[in-house]
Image: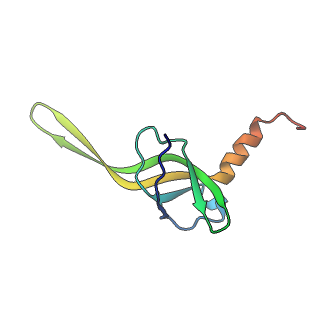
């Protein structure tokens, strides 16, 4: 079943798209969420604004005499590729003249 999460755009600027290929959205993502659509909802419509590309996390390492440990802590910031780049990619897949 799909899971719906709520978040806020956390980066600036989001336009022009040429200067901000990705944006940050303040919501938790997990392994397997890459490729999930991200929507913006207004009173009148729902718009796809991008897709989940990854998440920001803090990586810490601890060295002990007999082992090394690595800890990854999610920061709750998702990296989202803006929809304009998705459209451009889809258009590259279309045969010329169609």
Look at 62% across and 61% down and name the residue there.
Answer: 19
Q: Residue furthest front?
A: 1
In the displayed structure image, the side of residue 6 where residue 64 appears, left or right: left
Q: In this rendered view, identify the residue nearer to me: 9 or 22.
A: 9
Spot occupied by residue 61 in the image (x, y as percentages of width and height): 22, 43
Q: In this rendered view, identify the residue nearer to me: 8 or 85.
A: 8
Image quadrant where residue 16 sits: bottom right
Figure disc tally: 0
Image quadrant where residue 94 sits: top right
Spot occupied by residue 50 in the image (x, y as percentages of width and height): 60, 52
Q: In this rendered view, identify the residue nearer to me: 84 or 45.
A: 45
Look at 47% across and 42% down and name the residue there.
Answer: 33
Image quadrant where residue 66 sits: top left
Q: Residue furthest left?
A: 65
Q: Residue furthest right?
A: 97
Spot occupied by residue 22 in the image (x, y as percentages of width and height): 56, 54
In the displayed structure image, the side of residue 77 where residue 60 appears, left or right: left
**Relative to 90, does residue 9 appear above or below in the rendering?**
below
Spot occupied by residue 20 in the image (x, y as percentages of width and height): 59, 59
In the displayed structure image, the side of residue 38 where residue 91 appears, left or right: right
Which quadrant would the C terminus be assigned to in this image?
top right
Look at 72% across and 41% down and name the residue there.
Answer: 90
């Amino acid at each position: 079943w799909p899971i719906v999460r709520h978040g806020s755009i956390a980066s600036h600027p989001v336009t022009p798209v040429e200067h901000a290929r990705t944006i940050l959205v303040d919501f938790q993502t997990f392994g397997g969420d890459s490729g999930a659509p991200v929507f913006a909802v207004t009173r009148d419509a729902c718009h796809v604004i991008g897709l989940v590309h990854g998440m920001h996390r803090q990586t810490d390492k601890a060295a002990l005499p007999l082992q090394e440990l690595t800890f990854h802590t999610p920061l709750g910031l998702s990296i989202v590729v803006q929809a304009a780049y998705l459209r451009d990619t889809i258009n590259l897949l279309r045969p010329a003249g169609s």
